[in-house]
Image (tube, grey):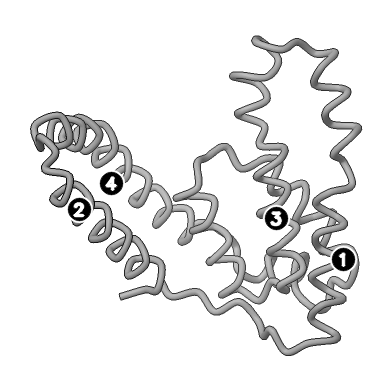
């Protein structure tokens, strides 16, 4: 069991306790739970299977070469570009990050990848941002946030030099 799961379980227990103390009617809560489960469980199953396939398809030698310690500062732009191109939600993106970590990517590259994916995922830009907000807004947003993934990676690199955070250790 992971720490994250234990935290969610504790939060769920606290909220359940509050609902019991308030004598809330459980019907709308259970109805909402079932609605969300019906939507999310099939998506999660498909995403996890896809993440497993992605993990097997990624060339581990190339990841080590371009995002590992030997790549130096080149690892940051490669990781930023990769984060931009990953067309997936968090289940697949973090599974890919775990594969990168197992394949020898540096922590700074992983931070850059996740930050780039969070800010610039191409699928969100194409599906939501351009149609809803327009290309002018996209240009302004990209220009104003372009350095953020690189700064995050450099900060992670510097923090790793000064402190003992350690390398990412995926548990897959």
- Residue where numbered disc 4 is placed: 45
Q: State yes or no: discs 3 and 1 in contact (Cβ < 8 Å).
A: no
Q: Please say if 83 is above or below 152.
A: above
Question: Which badge, 3 or 1, comes first in the chain's sequence?
Answer: 3
Question: Which badge, 3 or 4, comes first in the chain's sequence?
Answer: 4
User: Neighbour class for label 3 at 10 Å: few (<14), some, many (≥20)?
Assistant: many
Front position in the image: 94 or 99: 94
C-alpha gap between disc 2 and disc 4: 26 Å
- Which residue is painted at 77% across and 50% down in the image? 80
Q: Position of residue 63 (x, y in %)?
A: 68, 65
Front position in the image: 85 or 150: 150
Question: Is residue 126 found left or right of 79 in the rendered image?
Answer: left
Question: Which badge, 2 or 4, comes first in the chain's sequence?
Answer: 2
Give the residue at the far front of this rendering.
22
Q: State yes or no: discs 1 and 2 in contact (Cβ < 8 Å).
A: no
Task: Indicate the secondary structure of the residue bearing disc 1.
Answer: helix
Q: Nearer the viewer, mark 3 or mark 1?
A: 1
Q: Please say if 147 is above or below 12.
A: above
Question: Residue 154 bears which disc, if any?
Answer: 1
- Residue where numbered disc 3 is placed: 113
Q: State yes or no: discs 3 and 2 in contact (Cβ < 8 Å).
A: no
Q: Nearer the viewer, mark 4 or mark 1?
A: 1
Question: Which badge, 3 or 2, comes first in the chain's sequence?
Answer: 2
Q: Nearer the viewer, mark 1 or mark 2?
A: 2
- Which residue is painted at 71% across and 51% down in the image? 115
Task: Indicate the secondary structure of the residue bearing disc 4.
Answer: helix
C-alpha gap between disc 3 and disc 2: 37 Å
Question: Is residue 137 found left or right of 169 in the rendered image?
Answer: right
Q: Position of residue 86 (x, y in %)?
A: 61, 43
Q: Please say if 1 is above or below 36.
A: below
Task: Indicate the secondary structure of the residue bearing disc 3.
Answer: helix
- Residue where numbered disc 2 is placed: 16
């Amino acid at each position: 069991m992971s720490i994250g799961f234990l935290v969610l379980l504790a939060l769920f227990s606290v909220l359940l306790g509050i609902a019991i103390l308030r004598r809330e009617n459980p019907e709308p809560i259970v109805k909402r739970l079932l609605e969300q489960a019906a939507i999310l469980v099939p998506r999660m199953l498909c995403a996890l299977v896809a993440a497993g396939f992605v993990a097997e398809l990624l060339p581990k030698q190339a990841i080590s070469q371009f995002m590992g310690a030997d790549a130096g500062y080149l690892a940051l732009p490669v990781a930023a570009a990769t984060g931009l191109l990953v067309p997936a939600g968090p289940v697949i993106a973090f599974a890919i990050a775990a594969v990168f970590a197992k394949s020898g990517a540096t922590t700074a590259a992983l931070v850059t990848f996740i930050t780039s994916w969070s800010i610039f995922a191409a699928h969100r830009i194409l599906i939501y941002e351009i149609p809803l907000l327009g290309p002018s807004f996209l240009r302004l947003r990209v220009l104003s946030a372009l350095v953020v993934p690189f700064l995050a990676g450099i900060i992670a690199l510097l923090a790793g030099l000064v402190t003992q955070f350690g390398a990412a250790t995926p548990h897959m």
